[in-house]
Amino acid sequence: MTRTWITICIALGLILFGLGVFYYKAVMLSYPITPSQTVDSWYIEFSSNIEPKSRRNKDALEFALAKPRDNENYVVTNLQMFAPEFGVEDDSNARYEFTKRSLVGSETILLRFNIFAIDNPTPIKSADVKIDDQYRKKNRISNPDDKIVILYEKIDEIIKEAKDKSAGPVSYTKQIIKILDQDKSSQRFLIEEMGVSSREAMIVKLLGASDVKARIAHGFELQDRNNNLDIVTWVEVNDGKAWKRVAVSPAMSSLENYYLWWVGDHDVFNNAESVRYSYTLSSKANRDGSLTREIWMQENRNPVLNFFSLQTLPLEQQFVVQILVLIPLGALLVSFFRQMIGFQTFGTFMPVLIALAFRETGLGYGIAFFFGIICVGLIARAYITKLHLLMVPRLSAVLSTIVLFIILMMLVTKDMDISLGISVALFPVVIITMFIERMSTMLDEKGGLDAAYGFIGSMFVASVIYIFVLSGYTIHLMFVFPELIFVSIGLCLLLGRYNGYKLMEYWRFRQIKKATS
C-alpha cells in the first residue's frame, strides 16, 4: 500500500509540474497552443564548408559572405556568425569579410538567424541602384564594327517587341523574358557579346537600355521543416513606388514567400575564386510568437525557459526532436490500450514504431505494405523452421528475406505515381523481424486466433497513434510545450499501479457474472 501512495504522489507531482509550466507558458507568456495558420517568423541556418581549390596554394585568403539584412517585408533578428578559424569583419556593405593566412583543409562557416515578417511593409527607395544604361542609344559606340551593329539591332528588336506587348515595367520585363525563352540562340548571343556572366545580368542590361531601373536579387523560399533549400535568383524592377519581383524562369514558383538575402551579380560568397565551397540551407517555421518577440526586442526576461526551449537547437536537431517528443505520448497510448482496454499487441513500443513508418507512407498504403511484408516473412519463417536452425541464424535468414522483399517492392513502385518506393524502406526492418518471430511463436503455441488478435491489436493501436499523435496539432503542442512529457510520465506511473479488470475482460467474463448472480 505504501508503494502505491508513493507512486501516486510522484505521479501527481510530475503531472502538476508539467501542467504548471504549460499554464505559465500558454497563459502568462502567450505561447500559442494551436499551430498558427499564418506563419510570421522562421528559423534559418546556413552552413558552408570552405576548402582551398589547390593544396599547393599557401597564399592568404580574403573573401566575403552576403550578410542577411532587413528588407521591405522581413526583419532579421538574433543574427549569429560562427567562423572560429577565420578573421571576420562586419563591413558597411552588408557582408562579412573573412581573412586567413592560409587554408590547408576544410573549415566550416555557420550562420544562424531569425526572420520576422513586418506587419505593415514599407517600400524601400531605389536611390542606391543606378540604371545600367550602357546600351541606351545615346551611350552607344559611334562607329561600331559589324558584330556590335548586330548586337545593337538585336537589342532594339527585343525592346520594340516587348514594349508593344506591355503596359508597365513589370509586364515589360516579363515580355523580355518570354522573348528570350522563345529564342535561345539570341539569348546566347546577347550573353556572349555583352560579356555578362548570367542570364539575369543580361536582362538587367536590356532593361537599362530602355531606362528601366532593375537589379539582380537572390534569396530562398521560406518553408517549414526543410533542410535542403536552394538559393535562387530573380530580377526586380522599380515602378517608381517599390521594387517588384519578376521570376526569370517558368519553373520558379510565386516569389511572394521568398526572403531577399542580397542583390548584385555575384554568389553568396564574393571574391572567393581561390576556394571551393558547398552549403546547406535550412528553414523552419516558428509559431512561437512570444519567444520571437523576446528575441526581436532583445529581451531576456526568461533565461531559463529560453535555455530549455527546443527552438534554440540547430535546425537538423529540431527535425529529429519533433519526432522524439511524440514517442512518450505514443507509448502512453499503447500502455492505455493494453492495461485499461485489454488490446493485445506484439510488444510495447512496436505500434509506436509502426506508426512512425506510417508517417512516411500514409495510413492506407502503410498498412497494405506492412501486411505484405508480414505475410512474406511468415512464409519464409515457416520454410526456414523446417530446417531446424538455431534462433540467431534463423532470425538472420528471415531478416535477409525481408530486405530482399523490400528492395523488390522499391523496384516495382519506382515508376508508379505514388511515392512509396523509398518510404517503405523506412519501416524498422529489425522490429518487423521480431514481430514475425513473435507472431510465429504465438501461432505455434496459442493458435491462429490469438495471433490474429495480436496483429489486429497492433495495427489498430498504431493507426490510433498515427491519427492522433502524428497530427500537426499534436506535433506543435509537444514541441512548443515539451514539459507535457512529465504529464505523460505521471500518467504512465498511474497506469502501472492499476491492477483491476480490463474493459475487455468485463465482456469476456459476462457469462460467469450472470451465472454467479
Image (spheres, helix red, strand yellow):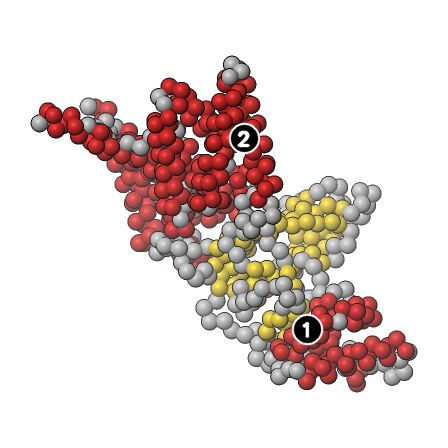
- The answer to whether 454 is drawn above or below residue 168 in the figure is above
Q: Nearer the viewer, residue 125 or 368?
A: 368
Residue under circle 2?
Answer: 402
Disc 1 target residue: 178
Residue drawn at x 62%, y 71% as measured from the top left: 246
Q: Position of residue 372 (x, y in %)?
A: 49, 36
In the shown orientation, is residue 167 left or right of residue 300?
right
What's the mark number on residue 34?
Answer: none
**Can I make out residue 114 in this image?**
no
Name the secondary structure under disc 2.
helix
Query: Where on the picture, by quarter, is residue 501?
Result: top left
* Neighbours of disc 2 within 10 Å: few (<14), some (14-19), many (20+): many
Q: Residue at x 36, y 42 (%)?
A: 464
In the rendered view of the protein, which quadrant contains the N terminus? Answer: top left
Name which residue lies at 54% across and 70% down. 72
Distance, label 2 to label 1, CA atoms, is 52 Å
Residue 106: image location, x then y, percent: 70, 42
What's the residue type where badge 1 is placed? Lys
| As drawn, 281 above or below 366 | below
Picture coordinates of residue 374 (x, y %)? 47, 32
> In the image, what residue occupies the spot 36% across and 38% down?
460
The numbered mark, 2 or 1, whose residue comes first in the sequence reads 1
Residue 377 or residue 494, whichever sits in front:
377
Which structural element holds mark 1? helix
Badge 2 amino acid: Ile
Q: Is residue 138 left or right of residue 321?
A: right
Q: Residues within 10 Å of mark 1 (few under 14, many from 20)?
A: some
Count up the numbered dots. Answer: 2
| Residue 35 appears in view | yes
Percent x, y for residue 180? 72, 72
Hey, which quadrant is residue 347 in on the image? top left
| Quadrant location of the C terminus in the rendered image | top left
